[in-house]
Image (cartoon, rainbow, N blue to C red):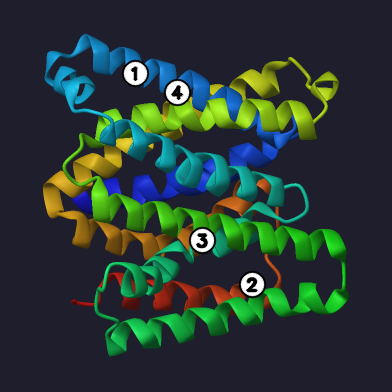
Amino acid sequence: MIAATGLLFSALWSSAFIVGKVGLEAAPPLYLLAARFLVAGIFMISVSVAIPSYWRCYADGWRPWLLALLLGLLNNALYLGMSFYALQSLPAGLVILLVSLAPIMTAVMAYFILGESLTVRKIIGLFVSLAGVGIIVYPRINRGDFSEILGIILASISALALAGGTVVYKAYAVQVSAFWLNAWSTFFGGLMLVPVALTLDNISVVKWNATLFGAIGYLVFVVSIGAMLLWFWLIRMVGASKASTLLFLNPPLGLFLAWLLLREAPTWNELLGVFPVSLGVLLVVRSKE
């Protein structure tokens, strides 16, 4: 059951980018994400207010609120904002591959910021993953298409933002309720994106149709809430270290789902590079401190 749940979580995580790609047909990325975060955040905040066990979180001073703001910026506004912008010029499978490097970046950042050990296995995983990424992105960079190069840069920055959020959480937020923190960071991420969306994107191009509402509904209830609950359940059942091992499934599963659902046929270099990327992630997340 744990293995099946882990596979389902990876599929849901990857599906967010696939559904996001579809949703971009109806709305610019920042409007789509702002709606997703605000609806999901309000829903989860309502739950946290209705359950007495979460009330203490509202009386713990300013620190949890500051953490929620910072994680809303890193894990929501920047991570998904950048990656959804990248979806405009890159296939969903490629964006998933690049964002899947977040555990590698987390290990390096944790070494410099938190003083965690950078073991031989982690170093090997780092170089193996970088080799895989090189195989994947070199042909696109070599073509010189500015939109594709920009998409690669944005997806890489999004992975860096997610890694930064993970380091912040590990350093300061382990004593704060994960559900409460996710609820408010999601809501704050939505608030942050609203003025940016109004500035950068044209609201008149938004199509208020079934594609838009279906994408928002899926991203809110299936991904932001459903996948999160699965992740917390996995952590409770097997621990954070073992649960994070499942992250190595994201690159190949994302590539497969993008082909299956969007008919994005992977290129030869993506098929070749996905294996070292996944192996590198596995080496890093399974490395003992």
Distance between the alpha carbons at the discs numbered 3 and 2: 21 Å
Position of residue 242 measured from the top left corner of the image (x, y, whole percent): 20, 61
**The quarter of the displayed image where residue 19 is located:** top right
Position of residue 267 measured from the top left corner of the image (x, y, whole percent): 71, 70
Image check: 243 left or right of 257? left
Crowdedness near tag 1: few (<14), some (14–19) or many (≥20) residues, C-alpha within 10 Å: many
Kindly identify which residue carries mark 2.
270
Crowdedness near tag 3: few (<14), some (14–19) or many (≥20) residues, C-alpha within 10 Å: many
Tell me which label, 3 or 2, sits earlier in the chain.
Answer: 3
Q: Secondary structure at mark 4?
A: helix
Kindly identify which residue carries mark 4.
40
Q: Residue at x 13, y 13 (%)?
A: 52
Location of residue 47 with respect to 137 vertically, above or below: above
Crowdedness near tag 4: few (<14), some (14–19) or many (≥20) residues, C-alpha within 10 Å: many
Q: Looking at the image, can residue 11 be seen? A: yes
Kindly identify which residue carries mark 3.
160
**The quarter of the displayed image where residue 265 is located:** bottom right
Closer to the camera, 207 or 85? 85
Kindly identify which residue carries mark 1.
45
Image check: 203 left or right of 173? right
Tell me which label, 4 or 3, sits earlier in the chain.
Answer: 4
Q: Secondary structure at mark 2?
A: helix
